[in-house]
Image (spheres, grey):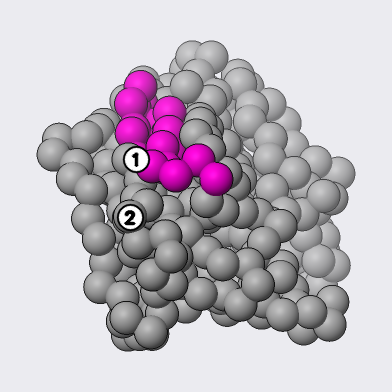
Amino acid sequence: MKKRFLGIAILSATVLFSSCKKDNVDDSHQTADFDIVVDNITQAKANIKIIPSDNDMPYYYYAMSKNKYEIEKAKEEDLGILGFEKAWYEQISVANGTEWYQEMAKDLKKGVQTTSSINPLGYLFPDSTYVVYAFGLDSTNGTLTTPIVTREFTTPPMHKSENDITITVTQTYDNGADFSVKTTNKDKYYISMQQKERFVDWYLSRNLETYMLVEKLIRSDFNNPERGVHLYSGDKDFTPEDIRVKQASGIEYVIIYCSFDEEYSLRSKPKYVYFTTK
């Protein structure tokens, strides 16, 4: 499954048509377009409805952060965000011996579509702007049948938790550490353990938004069946059996933690505790 996400607090969302070269658009569906409705916006979720003007037209829709959307759209001037989608499905087609648009055809929709989450994690992040986009596609040749229609939305500010979380490392091993978590209330929290040099330093040195680090961590855990995404509540003692890392001595690790729950998503900035494997 692809990596992506959405966000929200619509202040002034307008439907925009991205510039597409004429030779990338099939005229047969040029009268078709979309209405993209986003409502019930919270820090963690949003209801999204895609309403095509032609219910028989196959189309594709997705969403991502506005920052990522602008970066990916700019990589291929002729195709815009379709270039990003094409690159993804080309990876699958190479493995299956098919064409990229044949793989993308499996994800095309018809008629009105409603979803409460496009993000495979199930969570949006507070105070973040996202772009939902939709376009018609001819699955026999990969030609656009409509302009690309977009709608932006922004999530509300962070709903901060009053939980004062403290983590203390009590013992280190070659595959992790024993550590204790002390809390001041029952608000949920998220914990991850990552190599300092390979992951954490990269994000911190680039001053990337707080949510981007946490989102990356949660997505990584979501895609790792051995770990999975776990939220905790209250005081707890952890051992390497709970959070295991690659067995090796002398490696610097970081325990990253923050308040996080299903209703409000990220509820505090991440904090860091450092240790070195024994």
Determine the secondary structure under disc 2: loop
Residue with the most extreme front position? 28
Q: Is residue 17 above or below residue 211?
A: below
Residue 199: image location, x then y, percent: 55, 70
Is 96 on the left or on the right of 90, as rendered?
right
Q: Label 2 amino acid?
A: Thr
Q: Residue furthest left?
A: 12
Q: Residue at x 27, y 42 (%)?
A: 153
Tell me the residue that label 2 is attached to.
31
Lateral position of residue 50 relative to residue 60, left or right:
left
Per the model, the C-alpha gap separating discs 2 and 1 is 16 Å
Q: Is residue 66 above or below residue 161?
A: below
Residue at 82 percent across and 49 percent down: it is: 225
Query: Could you say which quadrant of the image residue 224 lies in?
Result: bottom right
- Expressed as whole percent of the image width and height from the top left, the position of residue 250 reads 72, 74
**Quarter residue 229 falls in:** top right
Q: Find the magenta span and give its range.
A: 36-56
Q: Please tell me whether residue 161 is drawn above or below residue 208 in the rendered image.
A: above
Q: Residue at x 47, y 22 (%)?
A: 263
Question: Does the segment drawn in magenta span residue 47?
Answer: yes
Question: Going 63% across and 67% down the picture, which residue do you hit?
Answer: 139
- Labelled disc at residue 36: 1
Label 1 Cα crowd, 10 Å radius (few <14 / some 14-19 / many 20+): many
Q: Is residue 136 visible?
A: yes
Question: Amino acid type of disc 1?
Answer: Ile
